[in-house]
Amino acid sequence: MKDFWNERYSATEFVYGKKPNAYLKEKLTKFNPGTILFPAEGEGRNAVFAAGLGWKVSAFDTSTEGRKKALSLAKEHNVEIEYHTEELNGIGYKTAQFDAIALIFTHFPPEIRKEYFQHFNTYLKKGGIIIFEGFSKNHSEYQEINPDVGGPKNMEMLFSGQELKDDFANFDFMEFCETEVELDEGLFHKGKGSVIHFVAKKKG
């Protein structure tokens, strides 16, 4: 997957655009800035947006090409972000390091997803929040109609509501829904798709 994302992000244009994800933008502005983690952050559009709001931003991705573009975008907006290009276990994030974690289209392979979600739980402070948007199992029907809407082709990498509620069982869900959205995020998220949204707070 590292080679796949390096090839995709090596394009001159920002393939998912420079603007933040709409759901993240709507929800993040409701919280006071603190420390936030952006896993699988790609070209940095969401991390840079958060930094512009005053958040202390950490991000990671396996793609060195994504990191280059993220740091370039941060410089363009005159903000700073910390961005690692290592596997999660090698970075060294600490227990209760973050006030928030943004999981925006973080479709990890099923064999590591549960482990990663457990790590995110550890890294988040009690009372910390997760803001989540990801493609649902129903999204495959939208992909058949319009491949440009993007998302994983592997059904196991798409999310079900029950799986997510099980994975984040020690969270209180402030909101949780599966819904149809109209995506306009660069070249690879264009058109109608099915996503799951949630904002959740870690139980104290």
Image (spheres, rainbow, N blue to C red):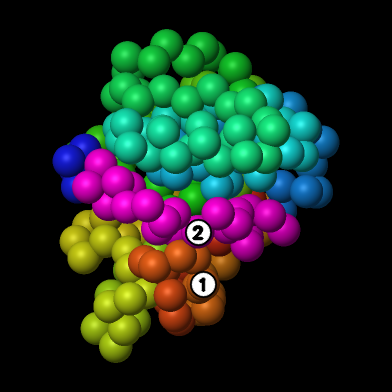
Q: Is residue 185 visible?
A: yes
83 left or right, relative to 107? right
Dots 2 and 1: beta carbons under 8 Å? Answer: yes
Magenta part of the protein: which range?
A: 5-26
Give residue 184's mark. 1
Q: Amino acid at mark 2?
A: Gly
| Residue 83 drawn at (x, y percent) | 47, 26
Pick the front one: 132 or 151 = 151
- Residue 138 quadrant: bottom left
Image coordinates for residue 56, horizontal then vertical, percent? 68, 25
- Name the quadrant of the C terminus: top right
Mark 2 to mark 1: distance in Å?
A: 9 Å
What residue is rendered at 32% in x and 64% in y? 151
User: 96 or 7, which lies in front?
Assistant: 7
Q: Residue at x 29, y 88 (%)?
A: 145
Q: Is residue 112 rendered magenta in the image?
A: no
> Tag 1, which secondary structure?
strand
Q: Which mark is residue 17?
A: 2
- The image quadrant where one finds the N terminus is top left
Please say if 117 is above or below 138.
Answer: above
Q: As displayed, is residue 42 above or below residue 178?
A: above
For image coordinates 22% across by 57% down, the residue present is: 156
Q: Residues within 10 Å of mark 2 (few under 14, many from 20)?
A: some
- Say which label, 2 or 1, has the lower sequence index: 2
